[in-house]
Image (tube, rainbow, N blue to C red):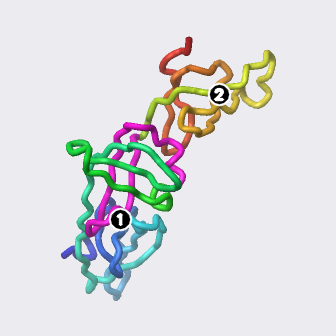
Amino acid sequence: MINYNELKPGVAFILDGEPYEVLEFSFLRMQQRKPVAQTKIRNIITGKILSRNFQHTDSFEEAKIESKKVKFLYSHRDKFIFCEIQNPSARFELPADIIGDRSKFFKTNSEVEVFSFKEKIINIKLPIKMEFRVVEAPPAIRGNTAQGGSKTVTLETGAQIQAPLFINEGDIVRVNTQTGEYDERIEKGK
């Protein structure tokens, strides 16, 4: 069991039957009152953030969240198919609502990390930076730097990002998958 004063940032616990992660923790002690733990917690399944205060009488069960690396194979009709890395024949699918808008950065045969709670997959995490081939890029027009010198390019997964004017079709670029922003050009296209 986790005591109320052990709810430090990063700790996962169960509240009302659902797993939560502590984002912020502060201890408040007022005169002639019992101490209170003020926290900001995030529901690991829904992503909803709450501010909650806990008393000295509160204790919680630790949330056992398991993680493992899997390989993304393909998507078909809002279903995303994955396999275990050690056992490629062990395949499973996830619906689009668990994947969310991260699906635009899913590349065939890329490794991702899945998190499960009570043997049900609740979240998925891509590597922070991934490399993609640019499949469509409008030509840079000389003198067109009024908007900061960027243009919209399309990646091999269909995602569209803002990239510098010097990026061309065929280039391989590194993208931050959390923010969806261009990071750097890895290889110049031929």
**Which quadrant would residue 42 be assigned to in this image?**
bottom left
Q: Position of residue 63 (x, y in %)?
A: 26, 69
Number of numbered callouts drawn: 2
Residue depicted at 22% across the width and 74% down the height: 2
> Where's residue 75, x and y in %?
47, 48
User: Of the numbered discs in the image, which one, if any, rests on residue 149?
Assistant: none
Residue depicted at x 23% and y 66%: 64
The residues tagged by marks 1 and 2 sit, at their Cα atoms, a distance apart of 40 Å
Residue annotated with mark 2: 136
Image quarter hosting the C terminus: top right
Query: In this image, 74 relative to 57: left or right?
Result: right
Q: Is residue 188 left or right of residue 12?
A: right
Query: What residue lies at 63% left-to-right and 20% top-to-bottom?
Result: 168
Please tell me whether residue 23 is drawn above or below residue 57 in the rendered image: above
Which segment did they paint magenta? 100-127
Residue 33 position (above or below residue 15): below
Quarter of the image for the N terminus: give it: bottom left
The residue lying toward the viewer, choosing from 55 and 189, is 189
Is 122 located above or below residue 113 in the figure? below
Q: Which residue is mark 1?
A: 21
> Which amino acid, mark 2?
Glu
